[in-house]
Image: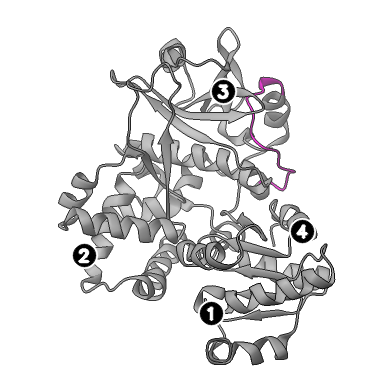
Amino acid sequence: MIPRAVYPTIKSLIEVKPVVLITGARQVGKTTLCDMLSKDLGIPYVTLADMDKRRLAENDPLMFFKVNGCPLIIDEIQYAPGLFEYIESIVDRERLRDPDSCGLFVLTGSQAYRLMEGVTQTMSGRVGIIEVPAISLSEEYGLSEHPFTISPENAFVRAGRVHDETGTLERIVRGMYPEVVSKGVPSQRYYSDYVETYIMRDVSEMINIRDRNKFRSFMEVVASLTGQVLAYESIAKAAGIDQKTAKGWLSVLEAGGIIEFLQPYSDSSVVKRVAKRPKMYMRDTGLACYLAGVPDARILFSSHLRGRMVETFMIGEIMKTHVNGGLDTPFFYYRDSNNNEVDLVMLFNGKLSMIGCKSGADLGLSDIKNFGRLATSLEKTGCAVCLADFPYPIAKDVYAIPVKTIGC
C-alpha cells in the first residue's frame, strides 16, 4: 500500500476539530485512510455502504448512535444525510461537558454538494474539511512531499533523487487512481468499470438520467475539452443536449470529484481585460484519456489532445501537493483580451507565481513570453514545467522545471 501524504493532515485536523469531513472522488483511497485512522486512533469504524447499517442510520438514527457510540468514523455518510442533525446535537452535548472536545466524528463521502448541505445547515464552524486526491507523484515515488513552489535549487536536488521508469505520457494515460498505480490494474479495464459504476451509483442517485448513453457521450465531450475555457454552448451542442442540462450535468461531475474549475486571475489594473469564464479540467488524466479515446502513450504523443492532457496532469499534480498539506492555496489562470495566457497562477507565500505547462522538453523564450504581460502589484516569479529530465535556465530567474520533481 502506498503511504498517503494527506494522512498527517487528517490526523492534525482530528486533534483540533470535533468533526472532520473527508471528501474526494470514488476510489481515491478514503476508505483505506479511515481504516488506518480506526486502527491508529482506536476509533470504531462503520460504513453506510453496508445496507444493514444504512437502514438503521436512515430509519432510527438515535439507535444507530446508541449502538455505535462516539467517537466514531462513518464512511459514505451521504447515504444517510439525516445523521448530520444528530451529530450536531451530540457535538453540542460533548462540547458543553468539555469545550475542547475534538475528534468526535470522522465522516467521509463522495458527493460533495450533498455533504456540504449537511455541514452548512447544521455544523458550520465545527467541521474540518479535507479533500483526498488521487495518488501524487511523490507518493508514487515513495518520497516525502512538499507544497510546490518555484525553486530551481530544489528541482535540481529532486531531479537527482527521482528515478522514473514510467514516462510522463504513459503515466498520463494510466492515471493516478490507487488501483492502477499500486495494483497494476489495466487502466482501460479499470476506467471502463469506474465509469459504469459511477453512472450507476452516483449520477443516478443525484439526478434522473433517462438516456445513459447520452450522459456517457457528454462525459466524453467534457474529457476531450479538458484544459479549455468553459463554454456551455459548445459542450451542449457536441453532446446533443440543451445548455441547462449541460450546466446541471457539469455540476454533477464537479460534485463527484470528476472535474474542477480554475477561475481567471485579475488584478485591479486589468479587471476589464481578463477572461471572465473559468477553465475546466478533468481531475484524473487516466479517466480523461479513456473517455476521450486515447488508449496509450503512442496515440497521445501524436494526438491533438497531447497539450491539453499534459497541462491537465501538471496542474493537477501541483494542486495535489498543496491539498495534501492542508493548504487552501488560491490557484487561477490568466488570459487577457488578446489571448495572452499563463496556464497557472498561484498565490503563495506573498508571491504571485506564474507557471507554464509545456508538453515538450526543449523550451525557449517564446514559451514564457506572456509572463511579462500579467500586471500585478505583487512580487512575481515564474517557471515552465516540462518533460525535461533536469532543470535548466530559459531566461534570467526563469527555469524549466521537470514535471517529475513536483512535490518531491
* Residue 373, quarter of the rendered image: top left
**Residue 385 among magenta residues:** no
Residue 143 falls within the magenta-colored stretch = yes
Dot placed on the residue nearer the N-terminal end, 4 or 1: 4
Compare marks 3 and 4 and give the one earlier in the sequence.
Answer: 4
Residue 76 in view here: no
Q: Amino acid at mark 1?
A: Gly
Q: In the rendered structure, which amino acid carries the disc numbered 2? A: Lys
Upstream in the sequence, badge 3 or badge 1?
1
Pointer 2 or 3: first along the chain: 2
The alpha-carbon separation of the residues under discs 2 and 3 comes to 42 Å
Front residue (pair 88, 181):
88
Asked if the residue under mark 1 is in contact with the one under mark 3, i.e. CB atoms within 8 Å, the reply is no
Asked if 63 appears above or below 138 in the picture, the reply is below
Instruction: In this rendered view, identify the residue nearer to me: 199 or 366.
Output: 199
Q: Which numbered disc covers residue 82?
A: 1
Left or right: 267 with respect to 61? left
The residue lying toward the viewer, choosing from 121 and 170, is 121
How busy is the neighbourhood of tag 2: few (under 14 within 10 Å), some, or many (20 plus)? some
**Secondary structure type for disc 1:** loop
Residue matched to label 2: 214
Which residue is pictured at 67% across the width and 23% down the height?
151
Magenta part of the protein: which range?
Answer: 141-153
Question: What's the residue at 56%, 44% (across, down)?
Answer: 166
Q: What is the secondary structure assignment of the residue under circle 3?
A: strand
Residue annotated with mark 4: 11
The amino acid type of the residue labelled 4 equals Lys
Of badges 2 and 1, nearer the viewer stands 1
Between the C-alphas of marks 4 and 2, the distance is 42 Å
